[in-house]
Amino acid sequence: MNALADLLRRAPAEQIRSGYADTAREIAQQPDTWPETARTAVNARPVLRALLGAADVRPGGAGLVVLSGSGSSLYVAECAAMPLQQALQTTVRAIPSGQMLTHLDGCVPPGRPGLCLSLARSGDSPESTAVVDQVLAARPAWQHLIITCNGAGRLATRYAGRPGMARLILAERTCDRSLVMTSSFTNLLLATHMLASLDDPGSYLAQVDRLGAVARYVLDHSAVLATTACGAFRSAMFLGSGSRLGAAREAALKMVEMTAGGVPAAADTFLGLRHGPMSSVHADTLVICFLASDPLTRICVSSNASRPFSISTTRAANRGSSSSVDPLTRTWAARSLTCAIQSLVLPMRAMPVRSLPSRNFAYVQPWFSSPTNWSAGTRTSSKKTSLTS
């Protein structure tokens, strides 16, 4: 049932020859790396509190938070921005590093304090340090937090000891050697979310343990993913709402990178798909849906997307009750889980109006969501599917 383990059992020379040695190992190691990252983030709480205070980031404060990165690091920022804004009760934006370099005044308003959080796997990309240098020069009152997987990178070493600058350097094994970011992505995201849990580190650590157990379950049943990956599709569309849009964009990038562009992939929201992008969804397109755990979001998506889609839901893995979990925790865990497994896909029998075959559809669902019947308009589905079916 564990297709990933089967790949890793092959001889190292064969893994290298096939081009997946680092990638498979780094995907598999994710749940084992999260506890160390979480402890590192928890130990940094005093520094993080001081940065937020100096940046006037508080409910009713003037401070802004800008999350900056490039490529997958930007998608980490997009996953984190909404939940952080909800927790910190201030404006939080995810902005590409390149855009900050070319349009700083439009991205970082003058005259307001704030925190610039730079996210990077290696920290050696030219724009990583260029953005920090530019903000230091143009907004000298701003505070800076660097979260990186590479303690020897330029981003980690260039500003060491500088006032108003803090670094959160993750374990060396989280700095992925593969072209594609997998464990780097999830660990950067996990560390970033310490900012949303400064007042409750115990709950944060407990959530990490639970997510690790869920991710191991998913990886142990990766034959389901392998079966879907072997399907006869020539393109892919990843759908997600809220913070899951960042996860969908990251998953689409992984599809493109890991097939060397052989499978074009795109990402959008459920409601945004209808406004043009659905033209790219054909009979040989795999549609992967990252489902929300929040009941209101589910209702909005099912009601407004009922014309192109009728989506059934299920419990993906053991086993909590969403009724006992606060909205921020549900959002945090949903995003973390979808990012942890990148593009978890399960076949589902849902037929859109455009008459795409049912095999075209797959979905991701948070483990703590109860099976739900959706009824919107004249299209209803209550099919319940287990992870291993």
Image (cartoon, grey):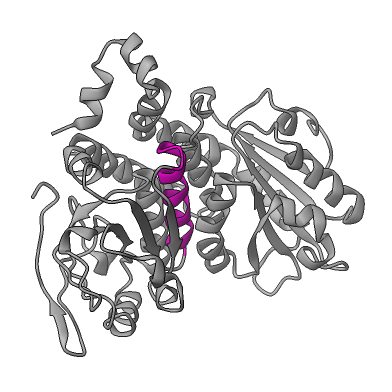
Q: Position of residue 343 (x, y in %)?
A: 34, 48
Q: Quadrant of residue 260?
A: top left
Depicted 36 relative to depicted 267: above or below: above
Looking at the figure, which quarter contains the N terminus?
Answer: top left
* Up/down of 74 relative to 64, above or below: above
User: Magenta includes 269?
Assistant: no
Which residue occupies 42% across, 23% down?
A: 22
Q: Is residue 216 left or right of residue 239?
A: left
Q: Residue at x 18, y 50 (%)?
A: 317
Q: Dividing the picture into quarters, in which one does residue 183 lie?
A: top left
On screen, residue 306 versus residue 156, left or right, reads left
Quadrant of residue 67 within the rendered picture: bottom right
**Boundaries of the magenta span:** 243-261
Q: Position of residue 37 (x, y in %)?
A: 49, 35
Which secondary structure dominates the residues rendered in magenta?
helix
What residue do we see at 30% from left, 66% from top?
293
**Closest to the observer, 387 or 309:** 309
Q: Nearer the viewer, residue 128 or 157?
A: 128
Q: Is residue 16 left or right of residue 324?
A: right
Position above or below: 383 against 231 = below
**Residue drawn at 44 percent across, 58 percent down:** 266
The image shows residue 234 at horizontal and vertical percentages of 32, 51
Q: Position of residue 329 (x, y in %)?
A: 39, 60
Query: Residue 245: within the magenta?
Result: yes
